[in-house]
Image (cartoon, rainbow, N blue to C red):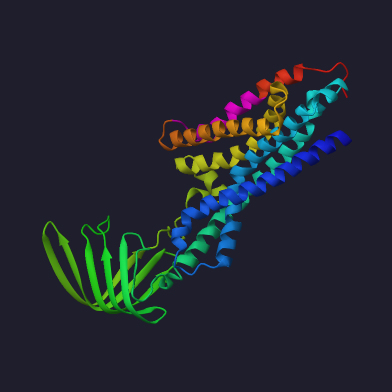
């Protein structure tokens, strides 16, 4: 029907604009958090482009349900303000008829997001880690500049007076704070050294020659001389072979969901968020019909309030699941269950508001 196609077209346009805007905003938020890792490591435009592409599946997992709800409220809020909803009802169209475009679009987005969540997401997150390792670890020597103190590596400050070649250094000064691997601060001075990396282990090694190690603690100090010493630097990222839950394939998550709580939470999260598209696709038209003439601005405001409540509940339930207070199933599905019930409630009353003649 032409009416359904018209509503679907407007919904699709709004959805495309919102997804594009949110993808840029969420990418910038994520990229700012890893900017420090790239400073001074030779990151170029191709590195940034790869990161943008590899982050899109994880961004879509959050942004697409949000975009569905905002697009629905913008569209149906505008229709209510222009009295189009009243005209459609008076012409005999039911709530289902008016909302069929929203149901169809949300179902299509849900199917697409299921594919992204279950198959594309772990592959993209693994590729993202590889890109970060290539930029940070393989280009680690580019962080050091002659005559400049560098504190890019966690807990370590390095000064090199001369750099004859890319991986070779002369007159090196290193200061390392105390941490889990070193119970007291140390100062290392060496005549020369070179840098190498092992991306598979996530290690950067600074091999120094002919120097001394000075350590101090509780007003006591000690000095050790060496002819060759390998100093391990912290890159700030985990080794490639140490996968986080969002980097693990869905089949492995399924097999290990009972033995590892974080795996179970990630699995249910991948299943629950795509289904949120359908929930919002049902909730949007139903709630818009009850609110009345809210317009685009009102629809945008209401959708933001709903999204804040939804993702607050999602974060809280995942946190409770990680602490063991609720099951991983509830950690991933609590928000969907609550808002699904709200969607059914408002849909029931919207459906009862039947026209005299339906088509």
Residue 278 visible (yes or no): yes
Would residue 160 be found to the left or right of residue 216 on screen?
Answer: right
Give the residue at x 45% y 36%: 319
Q: Quadrant of the N terminus?
A: top right
Residue 117 visible to an observer of this rendering: no
Q: Residue at x 51, y 67 (%)?
A: 43
- Residue furthest toward the left? 220
Relative to the observer, which residue lies in front, 122 or 283?
Answer: 283
Overall secondary structure of the magenta section: helix
The answer to if 331 sits in the magenta stretch is yes
Q: Looking at the picture, tell me which residue is in the foreground, 193 or 115.
A: 193
Magenta region includes residue 181? no
Q: Quadrant of the C terminus?
A: top right
Residue range corresponding to the magenta coloring: 326-343
Side (left or right) of 33 relative to 287: left
x%, y% of residue 17?
70, 46
> To which quarter of the image does residue 227 belong?
bottom left
Report x, y in % for residue 218. 12, 56
Q: Find residue 176 and report its horizontal and vertical position in percent.
A: 27, 63
């Amino acid at each position: 029907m032409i009416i359904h196609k018209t509503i679907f077209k407007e919904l699709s346009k709004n959805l495309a604009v919102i997804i594009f805007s949110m993808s840029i905003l969420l990418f910038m938020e994520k990229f700012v958090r890893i900017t420090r890792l790239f400073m001074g490591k030779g990151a170029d435009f191709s590195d940034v482009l790869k990161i943008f592409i590899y982050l899109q599946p994880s961004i879509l997992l959050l942004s697409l349900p949000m975009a569905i709800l905002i697009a629905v409220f913008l569209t149906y809020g505008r229709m209510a303000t222009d009295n189009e909803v009243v005209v459609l009802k008076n012409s005999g169209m039911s709530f289902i008829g008016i909302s069929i475009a929203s149901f169809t679009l949300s179902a299509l987005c849900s199917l697409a997001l299921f594919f992204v969540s279950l198959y594309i997401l772990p592959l993209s997150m693994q590729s993202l880690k590889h890109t970060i390792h290539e930029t940070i670890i393989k280009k680690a020597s580019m962080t050091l500049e002659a005559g400049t103190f560098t504190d890019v590596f966690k807990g370590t400050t390095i000064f090199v007076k001369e750099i004859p070649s890319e991986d070779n250094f002369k007159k090196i000064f290193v200061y390392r704070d105390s941490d889990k691997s070193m119970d007291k601060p140390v100062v290392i001075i060496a005549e020369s050294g070179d840098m190498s990396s092992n991306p598979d282990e996530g290690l950067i090694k600074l091999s120094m020659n002919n120097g001394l190690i000075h350590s101090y603690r509780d007003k006591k100090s000690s000095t050790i001389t060496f002819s060759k010493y390998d100093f391990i630097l912290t890159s700030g990222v985990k080794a490639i072979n140490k996968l986080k839950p969002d980097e693990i394939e869905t089949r492995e998550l399924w097999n290990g969901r009972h033995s590892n709580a974080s795996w179970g939470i990630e699995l249910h999260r991948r299943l629950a968020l795509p289904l949120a598209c359908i929930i919002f696709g049902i909730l949007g038209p139903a709630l818009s019909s009850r609110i009345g003439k809210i317009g685009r601005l009102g629809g945008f405001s209401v959708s933001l309030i709903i999204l804040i409540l939804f993702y607050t509940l999602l974060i809280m339930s995942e946190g409770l699941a990680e602490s063991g207070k609720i099951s991983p199933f509830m950690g991933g599905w609590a928000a969907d269950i609550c808002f699904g019930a709200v969607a059914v409630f408002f849909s029931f009353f919207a459906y009862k508001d039947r026209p005299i003649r339906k088509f």
